[in-house]
Image (tube, rainbow, N blue to C red):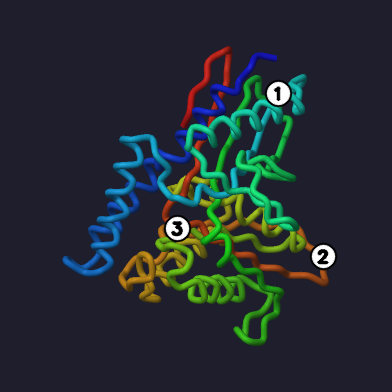
Amino acid sequence: MENLAPHFIELIRRASTDLPADIEAALHQARAGEDEGSAAQTAFDSILENVRLSRAHSTPICQDTGTPIFYVYYPTGWSTLALKKQIREAVEKATQMSYLRPNSVDTLTGKNPGNNLGDDFPYFHFEEWEEPYLKVDLMLKGGGCENVGAQYSMPDSRLEAGRDLEGVRRAVLDAVHQAQGMGCAPAVIGVAVGGDRGSSYIKSKEQFYRPLDDVNADPRLAELEQRLAREANTLGIGPMGFGGKTTVLSVKIDSLERLPASYFVTASYMCWADRRRSLIYRDGVATIE
């Protein structure tokens, strides 16, 4: 198999240093909606200047370059072992080039290997598909926003929330309220309803790969996504917790099958530095979106 490591390095560079266009456009729109001269508008000015400088100098948008999460969709006959090896080589090289900060730490010893390579770090999901080309989606998930994710087992008496979409609404708004400014708002909120505890967290994070203008195929969830975004932005938390009209940029929801005994609602939090990029490798040509 061809050595794709140079393409994977470029994928990492773009994800780390070049904010996607839909996220940047949403930040500009949010800034325009804040009161002139407010702390919220000043926060957006700093955020957008950081986005500009990071792109111009190929430096990380955030000092916490996060956990690299790779979703790899590959044609029949490709070697997942070879792909994993090349991506890990790219992660190590990207760390040497300072596109990634040395982030991974052995939990038991506290030792940092300095190359972002450890057990399940970076994280991989491989899926064989029927397309004749390779697609690799990369997300960089920061620690601060990861810390404020939340999971609820319904019904929840504290929230007076039952096993229905109204209960989901109450749980998600509670998660956003509890996060306050600690997750580096404005956020994208990824929500999963159902599953078990582990699959629900995974599905909630998969929502961050969706473009902000993506409309949910389920009209019930599409309506709830829009409602939650509106209501979360009335909480007054604002960018970086300084107050204001924009606490979230978007809410994305999906559902999973569940057991009758369980009804989980998981809300994962992505900071304004929603770093995601995709690499398409087709007929010997690599493009990054």
Percent across and percent down for residue 179 are: 50, 71
Vertical relation: 142 (above or below) 79 = below
Res 261 quadrant in image:
bottom right
Question: Which of these two is toward me, 209 or 222?
Answer: 209
Query: Of the residues shown, which amino acid type is indicated by label 3?
Result: Ser
The image's mark for residue 259 is: 2
Percent across and percent down for residue 210 are: 52, 46
| Quadrant showing the N terminus | top right
Answer whether labels 2 and 3 touch (C-beta < 8 Å). no
Percent across and percent down for residue 133 are: 63, 21
Q: Which mark sits nearer the N-terminus, 2 or 3?
A: 3
Q: Which mark sits nearer the N-terminus, 1 or 2?
A: 1
- State how far apart marks 1 and 2 are (Cα): 33 Å
> In the drawing, does residue 196 fall left or right of residue 135?
right
Query: Of the residues shown, which amino acid type is indicated by label 2?
Result: Leu
Question: Which of these two is toward me, 16 or 255?
Answer: 16
The image's mark for residue 250 is: 3
Who's the residue at 73% across and 70% down the image?
Answer: 263
Density class for disc 1 (Cα within 10 Å; few <14, some 14-19, many ≥20) is: some
Density class for disc 3 (Cα within 10 Å; few <14, some 14-19, many ≥20) is: many
Answer whether labels 1 and 3 touch (C-beta < 8 Å). no
> In the drawing, does residue 179 fall left or right of residue 85?
left
Question: Which of these two is toward me, 30 or 231?
Answer: 30
Percent across and percent down for residue 107 are: 71, 57
Q: Which residue is mark 1?
A: 75
The image's mark for residue 237 is: none
